[in-house]
Every structure is written in C-alpha cells, then in structure tokens.
Amino acid sequence: LASFREVNTAGTLNLARQAAGAGVKRFIFISSIKVNGESTLVDSKFTSSDEMAPEDPYGISKAEAEEGLLEMAKETGMEVVIIRPPLVYGPGVKGNFLNLLKLSKLSIPLPFGLINNKRSMVYLENLLDLIITCIDHPKAANKVFLASDGDDLSLTRLLTLIRQAMNKSPLLLPIPPFLFNLLGMLSGKSELVDRLIGSLQVDSSDASKYLNWTAPYTVEQGIKA
C-alpha cells in the first residue's frame, strides 16, 4: 500500500499542486473502476455517485488521490475531472486480456460456452476520445465519469468476437459455471476465477448526460483492432 500511495496518491497530488501553482486551468485524472470495487451482480452497475469501496492497495491509492484532488479543486480553483475506466484494451494489451487472445489463437475448443456474466470494458480509442472531450467541455469541470464502450460482454460473447475477428470458429464447449467455481475453491484460485467469470459493470451514462458523449468505436471494431 505504501508503494502505491507513493506513486498514485502522493505523486498525483504533488503534480496537481504544481499544476495549480503554474496556472493550469483543468487537471484530468485517470483513476480506476477499482475505486468502486471489484465486482457487481449481473445487471447491477457501478455509478459515479456510489460511495467509494476499494478493496486492494491500488484501488485505495487511487481513491485517496481522487479525494485529494477534489479538495485541491476547492482550495485552488483549478478544475478537476476524474475518469474511472474498467479494463482498457487495444493493440499491445497485456495481462488477462492478452492471455485470452493467446488462448483464442489456439485451434482447440475452449470450455466457456455457458458463461453469462457481464463485464464492462473500454477500447483505448474510446477512452482517448472521452479524455479529449473532457479537456475543454464546460460541463466536465469537477465531475467524475465512468468510461465504457457501452456494450457489456459475457466471457462467452467476448471469446466469440475474438475468434471471429481471427476468422476462426468460436469452438466453445457448454461447461456449467459452477464447475469453474468448484475448481477455483479446490485450487485456491477463486479470485482468478471471479475475474474470469464474474461480473463488473459500469454506468457510463453521465458522460452522455453532461458531455453528450458516446463511444465512437463499437466493441467489434475495438476487438478487431
């Protein structure tokens, strides 16, 4: 936690303090949906007005940075805009998304044909478009926005789209989700299984409401890229 705070909290607030002192009018902070929490129930979405509930050191450090920035906005008059993205994907993506790409490349059936979870993601170009919109939109000042493509995917649909973009058949076997949960418990990997088959949805309607913003690229275009 101390290491995350050093960079994400103290580092951010130090930069913002210097920006305010230099006369910067608006400071845009890329936070994280982890400020809201790690998961949602299916069809229940995090909103920008929810009470923050971070669960890990990364999320805690981002939440503390947000609080410090909004306080600084009151003290200095510098406008602050906070954007909380969920998983960001695009060319060069790493982590679990890259692992899914590698799995999808293999010409073998995958056991994910019955995973009806819902996860919000944001294609990199969509996130950049939202950031650009927030640079000078008058209604963005001192607001928090959740970013997403506006099209939440199940793991089944995500893998189908990935394989279709690779000109492959989906080849997904209908294995019941409870078997993955059981495997996670037996192997001590429940957290990993939750990230794979659990839900995490965000309500990005505030960006539409205040900024008249909609994602310019579809999920299909993002995944193909």
Image: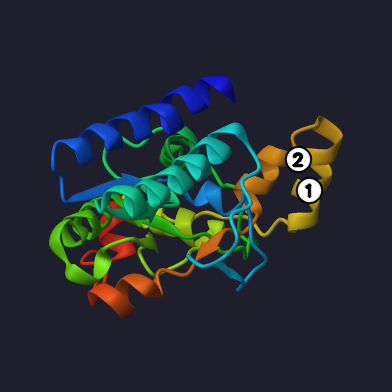
Image vertical order of residue 12 relative to residue 225, above or below:
above
Which of the pair 74/66 is nearer the observer? 74
Task: State the residue at coordinates (78%, 48%).
Answer: 181
> Does residue 203 appear to the left or right of 44 in the view shown?
left
In terms of image quadrants, where is residue 97? top left
> Does residue 194 appear to the left or right of 152 in the view shown?
right
CB-based contact (under 8 Å), mark 1 and mark 2: yes
Task: State the residue at coordinates (80%, 31%).
Answer: 188
Is residue 2 something that shows in the picture? yes
Task: State the residue at coordinates (23%, 32%).
Answer: 18
Residue 109 drawn at (x, y percent): 56, 47
For label 1, the crowd category at 10 Å Cα-Cα, with few meaning under 14, some 14 to 19 and many 20 or more, is some
Which of the pair 136/58 is nearer the observer? 136
Residue 99 drawn at (x, y percent): 48, 35
Which of the pair 91/53 is nearer the observer? 53
Which of the pair 221/17 is nearer the observer? 17
Residue assigned mark 2 = 190
- Secondary structure of the residue carrying tag 2 is helix
Which residue is farthest top?
3
Placement of the N terminus among the 4 image quadrants = top right
Residue 198 drawn at (x, y percent): 65, 55
Task: State the residue at coordinates (25%, 54%).
Answer: 77
Residue assigned mark 1 = 181
For label 2, the crowd category at 10 Å Cα-Cα, with few meaning under 14, some 14 to 19 and many 20 or more, is some
